[in-house]
Image: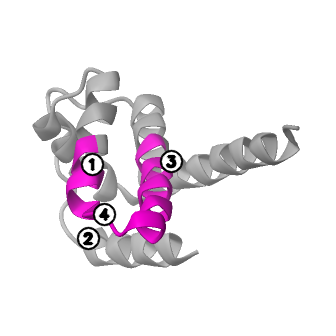
Amino acid sequence: MKHRIIFFSFILMVACKDKPQPPDNLIGKEEMKEILIDMAMSDVVVELKKLENNKDIYSEKYALFKSILNKYDVEENQFKNSYKYYLNNLDSANVMYDQMIEEMSIREAELNNKP
C-alpha cells in the first residue's frame, strides 16, 4: 500500500509536465511490467534479508536491479528512459500499475497455496 501511495504521488507530480516523445529504445509495456514486478519482488526479498542479518540493502538492491535488467537484456539507461516515459504518460502508467498489482496478487496467492 505504501508503494502505491508513493507511486501515485510521483505520477501526480509529473502529470502536469509536457508529454515526452517515446525514446528510440522504449521497452514495451508488457516487458516493462514484468521488469517492475521482478524489481518489486526483489525489494521484498532484500528487506526480509535485512531484518535477518542487517546487511547493506542498497548495494544488494542495486545488484538485484542489475541482474533483473540483464535477465531482460535491457541497459540501465534504456530502463531509466522508458520508466520516465511511462511515468509521464499517466494513462499507460496507471494501466501498467493495475496489471502489476493483479499479477503480483496472483503470484502471491499461488505461493500461499503451495504445500
The three-letter amino acid code for the residue at tag 4 is Lys
As measured in the structure, the alpha-carbon distance from the residue carrying label 4 to the one carrying label 1 is 28 Å
Image position of 32 with respect to 62: above or below: above
Which residue position holds label 2?
Answer: 14
Secondary structure at badge 2 equals helix
Name the side, left or right, on which 96 lies relative to 67.
right
* Residue 91 visible within the image: no
Report the disc number at residue 96.
Answer: 3
- Depth check, front residue: 73 or 24: 73
What is the x, y in percent for residue 57? 29, 62
Where does residue 65 sit, x and y in percent of width and height?
A: 28, 44
Give yes or no for residue 43 being in the magenta stretch.
Answer: yes
Three-letter amino acid code at disc 1? Tyr
Find residue 24 and report its horizontal and vertical position in percent. 14, 28
Query: Rounded to the nearest whole Å, what is the CA distance between mark 4 and mark 3?
Result: 32 Å
- Stretch in magenta: 38-63
- List the residue tagged with mark 4: 55
Query: What amino acid is found at the position of numbered circle 2 in the picture?
Result: Val
